[in-house]
Image (cartoon, rainbow, N blue to C red):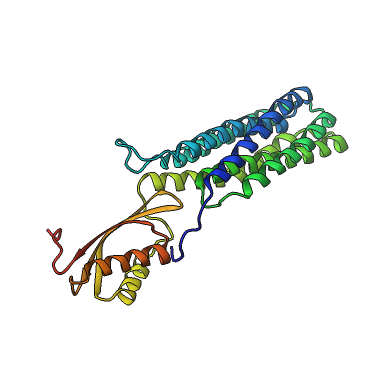
Amino acid sequence: MTQASQATDPGANQRRMLLAMLLTGAFTLIEIVGGLLSGSLALLADAGHMLTDTAALAIAWAAARLSQRPPDALRSYGYQRLQVIAALLNSVGFIAIVIWILVEAFQRLQQPVEVLGGPMLAVAVVGLAVNLIALRLLHGGHHHDLNLKAAMLHVLGDLLGSVVAIAAAAVILLTGWMPIDPLLSVLVALLILRGAVSVVRQSLHILLEGTPPEFEREALEQALIEVVPGVTGIHHIHVWSLSPENPLLTMHVDVADMRDYNRTLLAIKRVLSEDFGIQHATVQIEPGRCVDSH
């Protein structure tokens, strides 16, 4: 965390999620019908993705809106954590879908099911176009938004699912080999599983008040000692995040002279804001022995 965080546009991210939600929701019904008519697991798996995507995007959009509510007497930090909780729920839901696909694919490999390649190919091509548009909408958002990242993960899964469905349909039309459908479905599930697990880990890290991975204590101590006159050291540092783009910090700072208290505090805050992207910090300045040393 050596650079200031970039400004975000919550309203723009909310609009992106809403448009993507409406788009995926509208196509989900078409893909479910196509999967049932063709008998394709790849299409049904992709439809399952898109159905959960619609719900995931709805959760992400609602969380993004609610997170903008101002702090109140019960929640002095406001509602920003709702976006992290939504990201966690969406990623856990995606992992559940992956498990379902793996189980269903195993059963189909044991007992192959007839798949109609023509309808499967037509629906998959339309699905690919829809998913490309949805992914483009979300990709234009702020990449530090964990809530948006989790929503993108669902749409990316659908995009790969559509590509796999097209490939599987082509193989079935050309060769008639039915196992390609469940095999490629497993491939997509495993490719996306890593991303889902990553978002779960990031979400849990934030909810457990973990230190932001970019934060470097040594760099902060060096910057304060070199830039702020009179600072001799820092201790009792605690850094955590309300959301990936909103880190918080508390710390004690040792100073040689307390006579310029206000100037020293302003200089410390400036370093935290400009060099480390920390806008909200509580700093306790101490002239000598730390009052909390015992």
Q: Nearer the viewer, residue 220 or 117?
A: 220
Please tell me in which quadrant of the rendered image residue 125 appears.
Answer: top right
Please tell me in which quadrant of the rendered image residue 256 appears.
Answer: bottom left
Left or right: where 100 falls relative to 111: left
Establish if 92 lies above or below 274: above
Residue at (21% x, 69% y) in the render: 254
Task: Find residue 166 and report its horizontal and vertical position in percent.
Answer: 78, 39
Task: Find residue 171 and report its horizontal and vertical position in percent.
Answer: 82, 39
Q: Nearer the viewer, residue 209 or 71?
A: 71
Task: Find residue 106 and report its horizontal and vertical position in percent.
Answer: 64, 32
| Quarter of the rendering occupied by the C terminus | bottom left
Count of numbered circles on the image: 0
Residue 235 in view of the camera? yes
Task: Find residue 168 and report its horizontal and vertical position in percent.
Answer: 78, 38
Residue at (67% x, 41% y) in the render: 134
Residue at (43% x, 62% y) in the render: 1
Establish if 28 lies above or below 210: above
Residue 196 in view of the camera? no
Establish if 289 lies above or below 23: below
Left or right: where 119 falls relative to 197: right
